[in-house]
Structures are given as structure tokens and as C-alpha cells.
Image (cartoon, grey):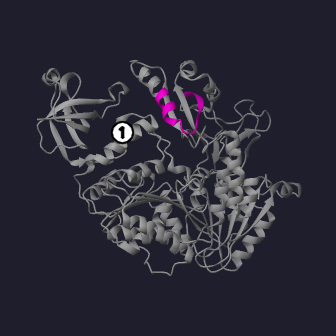
């Protein structure tokens, strides 16, 4: 007889705890998925074993229910269970939500036999290239740590085109020689394709598995099973691939580590790099963490300065071609000179020149749709989402005004619903309008658009990128999907149409995000044998983020931004806790925020109350008919556990309430404050 402590896969907050059961199955272990009776009627539920005990109190043993069966197909490792328990404490989430991160999607679509979706792909043949001195030095440090099987952390700060992927490939070879698997993470699904090609070309497709949301549920389950069965040596994917069911992980690579997509915006709101670090620190792994970026986050670069990460710098492009020439166009002057187009005169001339020379052009506009809002010039009416209250974006292709938060859409009115005027006009520009404008200016060239609206079909993104790579498309217009990681040899010009859009986001990171986006986008030009050109259009051309990006001066930007962060006590000099209260009833959301604020203040030391900011309507005060209030807490560095424990106490007190009229979600160091 064994006694197992099990977390039940249940939706209720009040049952999110470990329950003790008797178990007569010899094959049960920590991590086993089990079926057991729970609650009234003894209906069988699923659960996961989080610990095993040899004995329990005699009085308790007489009351115990018993595990009915153990699922032989799905089981987690003890290391995964330890990581899930850590996530529960770290992100103040439910225990079962953390465990679910490690479980396979599409479970019972598993009976059908499906082939590996990447079987037959040959990838990009890998030819061994001579490393630069800087590449060799970085690789040596990493491989020494791998061979010593000691946990180490590295940050590779390498300019675009400096050969970071080559280092990842050779470090992966060192892991595989020891029989230890590897996880390679990319921030976007669009970027996994190129990495997959490089790795399949080197290692073949039989030892590689891919995990991301574009796979069907059945495909995801099959990939998960291949990994868990031990036939996979390399897992490639977006952030959820950090939970791949591997044993004895030798290395996790986080490419483009600065990207906000590595922070989960769903519950649990985990930080991918923190989870990777936790898994690699575990006694069963003792692996190496490698972060890579041309524009490291301010937080991680500061950690490298403090010695938490070992810093390796790659300051030159692998092919020795100079970094692209970057020029800034002041769009205020364009307007004064009578140019109302989204394409400046300088950008137009540069496009003409590059296309005539047989080069390709990429244009970045990080705003989709045709026009950013629909308004009446007679009375000022603006079309807004009835569920979220935000301006609707006009999509010309569908003839609809669409909410980019909840998906609500409506036909664009022909006359104003407020005053009856016919002066309905469209303001602002998105990628759809940019495509129309560019196609009219350059009718002899093939123009293609890449954004969330144009690549909804499976395989469409890969098809469009392949067409551009093969030269069938001359001009590629897109949102930030095209700004990072892509490697096209014939791009002579990158135009950044509205570089300062992100400066208007209500987030202390907006200068950092602007600098990163410009630098990353600029890095798409001149990756072949010739120097590239970049034109940055902005209405705030003198902002330090834009100036440092144009000068390709990361150190200058970092020093300026780090000084501001230190003065304002923003990360990395603190942790920020955001609590968002939502309810169908506005009064209930507002009242809940007020109650939590009072409870937190009452339990804080008086000197700490300056770190508790009063609740207010969220920037997005209503989404999908839910009213939203938010509250911010600034946690001094080194005291995260103390502040987390305080919030956990309040959460536990609220858990006992059977019916709550609101939901409270805690997000630690969020990447969006809307």
C-alpha cells in the first residue's frame, strides 16, 4: 500500500490543494496521471501525484478513498512536478494550472496514427563555417560548462548577423555527444521555421520535435509523446516549449531573449526565462542556459553586469559586411512640405533605387488594418466597440470595423449614426493601407503583406516568407512579425514607417521596446554581401530611443535607460505586481479593488505603503463586457517573497468565499499594463 498526495484537475479555486489517497498500483510515481473518485457521487476525476508517503495517520487511513487507475500514456517527471510547485509560489497561480503547463494538448486525439509533420524535410544543409574569434571564445565558455555538466548561464550580446545561431548549433552538438537533450526557443512561430531548417539540416528530422500553437491538437500530442518517450534530442518551439517533457536537459537556448512574448499573458503568467532557469538548476538537469540577442533587455544586461550571467559579445557581422546605414526622416517636416503620404520622399527614392538594382525591400508598420479609427468630421463621433469601449479599426478588405481586443466587428456606417452626416472618414494608417499605397506607387513589382490578418490560414506565413526568399515577392510589408530573426540575403532596404508608435504605449518599457524594434528591423537589411540601408520615419525623431537606435549604440541606450530605471525604482531595481480585478458589474470590480487595497495596506509596514498605489480604472477599462480595475505594487529588490506571501494570504482568505462577484489576477512584472 502506498499513500499518494494528488492535485485534482479541477476548475474550483477551493479545491486547488493536495488530497491524500490510498494506492495499490505498483507503477505509481511522482508525476503519474491518475484517475480517482472525488466529491459527491465518487465520479472519477483526473489528478497528478505530487508526492508519495509510506504511511499516514491510522484515523485518516480509514477514511481514505483509493486511486482507481494510473494512466500509462501520460506521466510527468519529478523534476516537472517540482518546477510546477515552484511556479505556484513564484507566480501566485493555482497548482493545477502550473501542472497543466507540462501536460500534453489534444490528449485523446491520440488514437489516430499521424506522421511527424516535419518528416521528409531536409532543412537547410549545414556547412561548417570557420568561426570568428569572438564566436570561438563564446562557444568555448559554453561547451566547457556543458562538458563539466555544471549549471551555468550565458548572455550572448551579438549584433544582427553575427552568427549566434551557429553557436547554438555547435553547443547543441556538445550536449548530444553527452546524450543530453536540448531546447531551442524562439519568440515567434514565424521564427521557428528558419531555426528548424538550420537544425534539421544539421541533425536530421528524426531527433527533432517542434512544439507551438500552429500545430493541430493531435500533432501537438504526438510531438509531446515522441519527446516523453525519449526518441527526441532537440525540441524547437515558442515559449511553451520550455515545458517539453525531457529528462537530463543539457541546454536551453532563448533566442531574441528580449522579446515580450516570452512573458505569458495567460494564466499562469510565467516568465519563460525564469522557468528555463529553474528547470536547469534542478538536480536532475544541471544544464546550461544561453540567452541571445542583439538588443538584450535592460533587466538581463544589468544581471550580466552583476555577474548573474556570463556575458559574451559579438560586435561584428559574420560576413564582415558593415552594419546598415541608418537615416532618420522627420515626418513633421514632410507634412509641412505638403507630403501627406505615409511614404516619405526619401523612402520613395530609396525604394526606387533598390528595386531598380534588383534588390528587395522590407517595410515595417507595427499597426494592422487599413485605418486606426473611423470618425465623423461633422460631430466628432468615433466608432467604438460596444463591449470594450475602444476605437474600432477599419479593415478595407472585409469592409468591417474591428475591435483588436475582443474580435467584435460591424459594418462601417455610410452615414454618422449620431448626426446623420455623410462625412464619415478614416484616420490613421495600418499595414493594409500601406500595401495599397505601395502597390499604387510601384505597380511593376510584387508586393505582399504579412500580419495577423493576412496569415490566418495554416502554412500561409511560411508560404509568403518562402516567396520573398525565392525572389518572387519584391516588397514585403508587415508588422513586427517581419522585424526580427528573419535572414534574407537580398534585402537592400528596410523602411520603418512609423518608428515612434510604441513610444505612446502606457508602459515604462516603451523606450526600450522602440529601441529594440528599430534595431532588430534594421538588422534585416544588408545580410548578404553588400551593405544595407535603413530609413526610419518618425514624428519624434529626437527621442533618445530613436537616436541611439539610428546610431546603433546599444551601450549608450542602456546607460541612459538604466539610469532612468534606477531613479524611478523600476525593474531591474524592483519587481512590479499588477493586480487586475474584473467583473460584469462595474461596482463589484471597483469595490473588490478597494477591499484588496485596504487589506494590503493594513498588513504592510508603514514605510512600505509608499510602494502601494491606489486602484484605478484599467487603461482598457472594459474588455468583452467585463469591467476592469487595476492596482500596482512596487516591490523593493530582494523582498519578492515577502510581498508574494502577503498577497498569497489574501488570496487564501478569498478562496473560502463560495461565490465571488469578481476575479482577481496577479501578474508579476507584466509586459503590458493595459
What residue is rendered at 81% in x and 65% in y?
345
- The percent position of residue 98, horizontal first and vertical second, equals 38, 40
First to last magenta residue range: 626-646
- The percent position of residue 527, horizontal first and vertical second, equals 61, 74
Looking at the image, residue 557 sits to the left or right of residue 216; the answer is right
- The answer to whether 215 is drawn above or below residue 633 in the figure is below
Q: Secondary structure at mark 1?
A: helix
What residue is rendered at 33% in x and 51% in y?
283
What residue is rendered at 38% in x and 58% in y?
287
- The percent position of residue 512, horizontal first and vertical second, equals 66, 51
- The answer to whether 249 is drawn above or below residue 420 in the figure is below
What residue is rendered at 41% in x and 24% in y?
652
In front of the other: 394 or 567: 567
Within the magenta stretch, is there residue 331?
A: no
Within the magenta stretch, is there residue 639?
A: yes
Inspect this view and state whether residue 496 appears: yes
In front of the other: 561 or 443: 561
Q: Which residue is mark 1?
A: 85
Looking at the image, residue 30 sits to the left or right of residue 524; the answer is left
In front of the other: 161 or 105: 161
Inspect this view and state whether residue 185 appears: no
The quarter in which the N terminus is drawn is top left
In front of the other: 342 or 566: 566
Amino acid at each position: 500500500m502506498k499513500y499518494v498526495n494528488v492535485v485534482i484537475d479541477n476548475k474550483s479555486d477551493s479545491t486547488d490543494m493536495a488530497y491524500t489517497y490510498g494506492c495499490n498500483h505498483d507503477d505509481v510515481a511522482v508525476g503519474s496521471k491518475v484517475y480517482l473518485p472525488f466529491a459527491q457521487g465518487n465520479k472519477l476525476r483526473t489528478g497528478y501525484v505530487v508526492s508519495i508517503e509510506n504511511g499516514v495517520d491510522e484515523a485518516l487511513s480509514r477514511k481514505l478513498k483509493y486511486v482507481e487507475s494510473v494512466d500509462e500514456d501520460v506521466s510527468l517527471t519529478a523534476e516537472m512536478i517540482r518546477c510546477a510547485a515552484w511556479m505556484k509560489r513564484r507566480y501566485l497561480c493555482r497548482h493545477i494550472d502550473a501542472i497543466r503547463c507540462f501536460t500534453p494538448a489534444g490528449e485523446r486525439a491520440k488514437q489516430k496514427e499521424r506522421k511527424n509533420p516535419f518528416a521528409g524535410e531536409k532543412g537547410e544543409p549545414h556547412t561548417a563555417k570557420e568561426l570568428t574569434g569572438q564566436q570561438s571564445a563564446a562557444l568555448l565558455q559554453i561547451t566547457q560548462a556543458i562538458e563539466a555538466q555544471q549549471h551555468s548561464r550565458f548572455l550572448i550580446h551579438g549584433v544582427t548577423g553575427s552568427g549566434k545561431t551557429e553557436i547554438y548549433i555547435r553547443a547543441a552538438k556538445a550536449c548530444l555527444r553527452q546524450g543530453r537533450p536540448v531546447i531551442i526557443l524562439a519568440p515567434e512561430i514565424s521564427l521557428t521555421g528558419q531555426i528548424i531548417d538550420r537544425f534539421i539540416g544539421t541533425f536530421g528530422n528524426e531527433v527533432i520535435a517542434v512544439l507551438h500553437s500552429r500545430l493541430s491538437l493531435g500533432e501537438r500530442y504526438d510531438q509531446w509523446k515522441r519527446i516523453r518517450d525519449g526518441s527526441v534530442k532537440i525540441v524547437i518551439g515558442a515559449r511553451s516549449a520550455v515545458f517539453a517533457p525531457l529528462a537530463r536537459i543539457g541546454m536551453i537556448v532563448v533566442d531574441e531573449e528580449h522579446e515580450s512574448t516570452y512573458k505569458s499573458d495567460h494564466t499562469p503568467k510565467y516568465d519563460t526565462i525564469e522557468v528555463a532557469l529553474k528547470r536547469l538548476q534542478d538536480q536532475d538537469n544541471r544544464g546550461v542556459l544561453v540567452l541571445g540577442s542583439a538588443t538584450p533587455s535592460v533587466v538581463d544586461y544589468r544581471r550580466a553586469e552583476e555577474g548573474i550571467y556570463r556575458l559574451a559579445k559579438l560586435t561584428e557581422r559574420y560576413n564582415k559586411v558593415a552594419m546598415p546605414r541608418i537615416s532618420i526622416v522627420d515626418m513633421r517636416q514632410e507634412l509641412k512640405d505638403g507630403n501627406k503620404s505615409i511614404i516619405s520622399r526619401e523612402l520613395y527614392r530609396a525604394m526606387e533605387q533598390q528595386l531598380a538594382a534588383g534588390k528587395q525591400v522590407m517595410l515595417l508598420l507595427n499597426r494592422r488594418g487599413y485605418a486606426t479609427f473611423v470618425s465623423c468630421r461633422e460631430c466628432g463621433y468615433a466608432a467604438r466597440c460596444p463591449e470594450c469601449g475602444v476605437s474600432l479599426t477599419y479593415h478595407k478588405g472585409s469592409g468591417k470595423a474591428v475591435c483588436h481586443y475582443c474580435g467584435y466587428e460591424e459594418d462601417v456606417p455610410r452615414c454618422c449614426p449620431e448626426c446623420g452626416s455623410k462625412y464619415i472618414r478614416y484616420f490613421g494608417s495600418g499595414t493594409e493601407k500601406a500595401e495599397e499605397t505601395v502597390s499604387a506607387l510601384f505597380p511593376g513589382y510584387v508586393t505582399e503583406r504579412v500580419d495577423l490578418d493576412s496569415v490566418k490560414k495554416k502554412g500561409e506565413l511560411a508560404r509568403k516568407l518562402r516567396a520573398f526568399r525565392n525572389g518572387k515577392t519584391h516588397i514585403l510589408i508587415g508588422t513586427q512579425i517581419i522585424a526580427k530573426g528573419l535572414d534574407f540575403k537580398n534585402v537592400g532596404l528596410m523602411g520603418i514607417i512609423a518608428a515612434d508608435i510604441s513610444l505612446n504605449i502606457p508602459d515604462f518599457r516603451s523606450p526600450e521596446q522602440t529601441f529594440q524594434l528599430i534595431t532588430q528591423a534594421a538588422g534585416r537589411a544588408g545580410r548578404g554581401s553588400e551593405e544595407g540601408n535603413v530609413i526610419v520615419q518618425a514624428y519624434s525623431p529626437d527621442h533618445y530611443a530613436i537616436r541611439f537606435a539610428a546610431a546603433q549604440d546599444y551601450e549608450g541606450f542602456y546607460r541612459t535607460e538604466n539610469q532612468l530605471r534606477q531613479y524611478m525604482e523600476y525593474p531591474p531595481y524592483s519587481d512590479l505586481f499588477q493586480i487586475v480585478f474584473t467583473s460584469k458589474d462595474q461596482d463589484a470590480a471597483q469595490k473588490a479593488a478597494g477591499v484588496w487595497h485596504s487589506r494590503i495596506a493594513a498588513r504592510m509596514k508603514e514605510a512600505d505603503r509608499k510602494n502601494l498605489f491606489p486602484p484605478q480604472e484599467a487603461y482598457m477599462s472594459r474588455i468583452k463586457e467585463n469591467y476592469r480595475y487595476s492596482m500596482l505594487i512596487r516591490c523593493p529588490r530582494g523582498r519578492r517573497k515577502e510581498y508574494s506571501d502577503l498577497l498569497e494570504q489574501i488570496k487564501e482568505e478569498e478562496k473560502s468565499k463560495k461565490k465571488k462577484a469578481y476575479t482577481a489576477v496577479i501578474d508579476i512584472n507584466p509586459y503590458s499594463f493595459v
